[in-house]
Amino acid sequence: MADQSVNHACVLRSTTHRSTLDPRPLRFLRPTITVVPIRCDFGVTPAASSPMNVELLRTIPTSGSVDERHFSVSAGANAWVKFSDDSGLEWVGVFGSGEASRFEAAIPFDDDGGKTVLIVAGGRGYVVDAHSMQLLRRTTRDYIRGAISVPGRDFVLIADWTEMRAVGRESDRRVWRREPAWYSYGGSEDSHRLALEGIVFDGATRDEVQGRVWEGDGWYAFRLTLSDLEFIRESFITADWDAASSSPAV
């Protein structure tokens, strides 16, 4: 079937957003489901101005019971995402899952009130126009392990085991660091290697994102300046791996 997608204008009420990922090696991962209620004011027609809700479904709806749109659907696992509003609009997007991560989420872009949404299905990212039900593009990474919405910005920040990227409507931009880490290989990618194996988002404001990275001897705090996407590692937190094993809601 042809790939299609979704776009809804939605309002996140908070000014500080929280999101983390499970930094443990893949073999220890448990399935992660992140449900993000989104309230949307489209401002197009009276019918389209109703609040929009977006959620990841745990149960697949009965065939034919709701309008479906398919996006790179796989023969294996897929993420089912329901979109609905008070006007009666209701449809479900089916997104093919990646194989390197079990992370799933629906994360709104904050600059348009959530009209654009990043859907993560098994680590694979889809940037969706939630109102028109169109796929804008796929992300360049298929093993996303965490994501966070950034207040007032035109992107969602994602992370895998070692890197972070700003996912926009048209492209991804890589987060960078000035000084390479001790475990870097001495190549051109050193400025983008941000952690040995584990990145956790703790919160975001319009100007920066805060979190933790695993550096072999323990967890260290970091901050990320959003004006230039520069990563700055800060103080040591703890040597306890399990101290960052839980994942609060987005």
Image: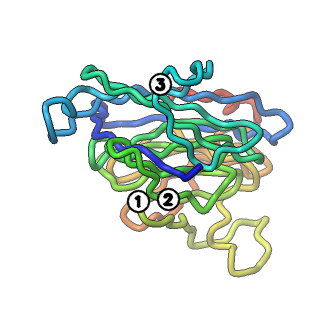
The circle drawn on residue 66 is 3
Which tag is nearer the camera, tag 3 or tag 1?
A: 3
Amino acid at the residue labelled 1 = Arg
Q: CA distance from mark 2 to mark 3?
A: 24 Å
Assign a secondary structure to mark 2.
strand
Query: Which residue bears the numbered disc 2?
Result: 137
Amino acid at the residue labelled 2 = Arg
Marks 2/1 in contact by CB < 8 Å: the verdict is yes
Residue 239 coordinates in the image, percent (x, y): 76, 38
Asked which quadrant contains residue 122, the reply is top right
Amino acid at the residue labelled 3 = Val
| Mark closest to the chain's N terminus, 2 or 1 | 2
Q: Is residue 153 left or right of residue 141?
A: left
| Mark closest to the chain's N terminus, 3 or 1 | 3
Q: Residue at x 57, y 43 (%)?
A: 120
Query: Which residue bears the numbered disc 1?
Result: 169
Can the viewer see residue 53? Answer: no
